Every structure is written in C-alpha cells, then in structure tokens.
Amino acid sequence: MLLIHKSVSKELLTTFFLSLLFLNFTLMMEDLMRVSRILSVVGAPMWDIAKIILYLQPQILIFTIPMAMLLSVLLTYGRMNADNELTILKASGMPFKNTATPVIYLGLACFAVSLAMSCYLGPKGNIILKETVSNILTTRAPMAIEEGIFNTAFKDVVILVKEKPSKDRLSGIFIFDERQKEEQRIIVAREGEIAPKDGAIGISMTDGSIYITRGEIITEINFDKYQLRLDLLTESERRKADEGMTLIELKEMAMESPERSCYFLFEFHKRLSIPALCLIVILLGPSLATMAGRSGKLGGFTIGISVFVGYYILLLYGESLVKAGDLPHFMGAWMPFIILGAFSIWTFGRISKK
C-alpha cells in the first residue's frame, strides 16, 4: 500500500505543479498586460517587469492553488480509472478511501499554503506591487515627456513642450486637459518643473494662463504659479484597497466603518473560504474522477474547470446579495463552500459504497 501511495503521490505532484504553472500563466496575463500598457509609456526596463511578475504571484496563487489541486486529482485519478488501475485496486481489497489517501496529504498542504497566501502574503504582495508600480511611474514618467512631441501617457491629458532644458525642466508648455468632460482646460505656461507628488506627477508651472470651457462659455485665468497633478493610474487601477489588508486589518476597518462593515466582513470570510476549497477537493476530486468514467484527461480538465466556474459564479452571486443587503456577509462568502461541500460528501459516500 505504501508503494502504491508513493507512486500516486509522485504523479499527483507532477500534475499539480504543471497545472499550477499553466493556470498562473493564464490568469497572470490580464494583469500583466494591463500593467505593461501603463509602464510601456515610461520605458520601464525588463528588470522592473520581472519584479512585477513576482509580486503578482501571491494574489494569483490564492485562486490557482485550489484549481491546480482539483485538476491534478482529476487528471491523475481519471488516468488511473481509464487504465483500470482503480478497478484492480478495488478488486485487490483496497477501499476507495485508502486509494484517496495521497489526496489528503496534498489537500492539507495546499490548504496551509493557500491560507498563508490569502491571509498574509497576498495582501502584502499587493501593497508592494502598488508601491513598485507607483515608484516606477514617478521616477520614469518625466522621461516620457519629450520636446516637440505630443505626449499622451497621462489619461485624458495631452502635453506638448517646445524645449526641455533638462530632465525635470520644461519650456514653452501647452497642456490640453479633458479629465473633467464638462469643464475642459487648456493650459499654457512659459516654463515649468516636473516632480513626483504623492505617488503621482506634479508639474509646477510659472507665468501662464488657463482657458476653461463650459459649453459656449470660455474663462481665462492668468497665473504666476500653478500646480498640476497628473495620474498615470486610473481610478479602476487604484480600486480594491481592501486587497492590501490582512485579516486583522479587515476586522478593524469593519469596526471603524459600520456603514461598510458588511463589505469588509465579506472580504474577511472570503479570504478563509477560498483556501478551504482545498479541503473540499480531498473528497470531490477522486469521486468526480471515478464518476467521469473513461473520459480521460480531457474529461477531467473539463470537469475541473466547470466546477470552479460554478463556484465563482456562486461566490459573485453571494457578494451581490451581500451588497444588496439580502444576505448576511457570512452566508455570502461561505454559501458556495457549503453547497459544494455537501455535494462532495454525497459523491464520496456514494462512490465509497460501490
């Protein structure tokens, strides 16, 4: 029995790490492309891109560890079922629960790692990622402004400078600012200076004018000194600040902001419910692989993806109900776990009795 468990564990681990690599690469592409589009306008070097890829991993691993575990179990036990190995083990007198013993060890290890990612490493990695992107932008954004070229690196802002005596100094400045659609602005100034300002870019201009348009009305304002703040990150890229909070910080925020307590408490319980998926997979994975019959690896992959799609749909639905006030925060976060857990216990019991 020990030799059988060792052989199954080896195949499980190999499939798990390959699945994890594939899923991490797939889920990382969206975030990486979004960040790359932002950093490309300031000419970030490959080393900075590599650091961002590293800091993205903890947040992604929260979701991919349970997914990779289920896929590895389905692929491994599906292959064993297709090759009649499970049938031979059962005919030899090995109970189904003993056949699934390697999955228990893998599930407990994945639960521990996923819990660490969700509760601590993920939030800290998210904070470091935002700080790194902000530092790159504030350091290299001034280099993106070149003399005699229209610069559109900043959202809804066009900058043209006649001369650039140094890296931080501008001369003959023209700026078209349409960040406020109902109040567009044209700014002209004799000279200015670029400097990082609170995680953004500040342009300090002297001796210029501002032309503000409101419909058919144009207002002219002359100034001796004027400070303009420019953001490379949009509000959508700055959202979800709670992703950088630990469990303790989420609890504290729920107490400090009673009007948003349900939102913070839902995030608190979601951080716990997602790693707990690994415990469900211990029962669900071998059962589904056996029920899938001889569908092989392709069938196991399809079933695994379908299970997680259903789980995350239920999780999003629960979140919507919590925000609408129709469901307690605890039930919104744990509802998918309870439904999938009940189904897992039923299927495992059914397969064990055969």
Image: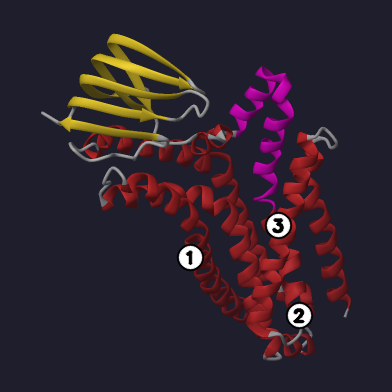
**Labelled pair 3, 2 in contact (Cβ < 8 Å):** no
Q: Which mark is residue 292?
A: 2
Three-letter residue code for mark 1: Leu
Q: Callout 3 environment at 10 Å: few (<14), some (14 to 19), or many (20+)?
A: many
Q: In front: mark 3 or mark 2?
A: 2
Viewport quadrant of the C terminus = bottom right
29 or 106: which is nearer to us? 29
Q: Residue at x 71, y 69 (%)?
A: 285
Q: Give the secondary structure at mark 2.
A: loop
- Residue 84, image quadrant: bottom right
> Which residues are drawn in magenta?
247-276
x, y percentage for residue 328?
82, 35
Query: Going by the image, does 87 lie left or right of 275?
Result: right
327 w.r.t. 59: above or below = above
Q: Callout 1 environment at 10 Å: few (<14), some (14 to 19), or many (20+)?
A: few
Three-letter residue code for mark 3: Leu
Three-letter residue code for mark 2: Ala
Point out the tag, 1 or 2, that comes first from the N-terminus: 1
Give the distance between the C-alpha atoms of the residues marked 1 and 2, in whole angstroms. 25 Å
Residue at image mark 3: 279
219 or 300: which is nearer to us? 219
Residue 109 in sight in this render? no
Give the distance between the C-alpha atoms of the residues marked 1 and 3, in whole angstroms. 21 Å
Query: Going by the image, does 195 lie left or right of 100?
Result: left
Residue at image mark 1: 21
Q: Give the secondary structure at mark 1.
A: helix
- Residue 346, image quadrant: bottom right
What coloring was used for the rendering?
Answer: secondary structure
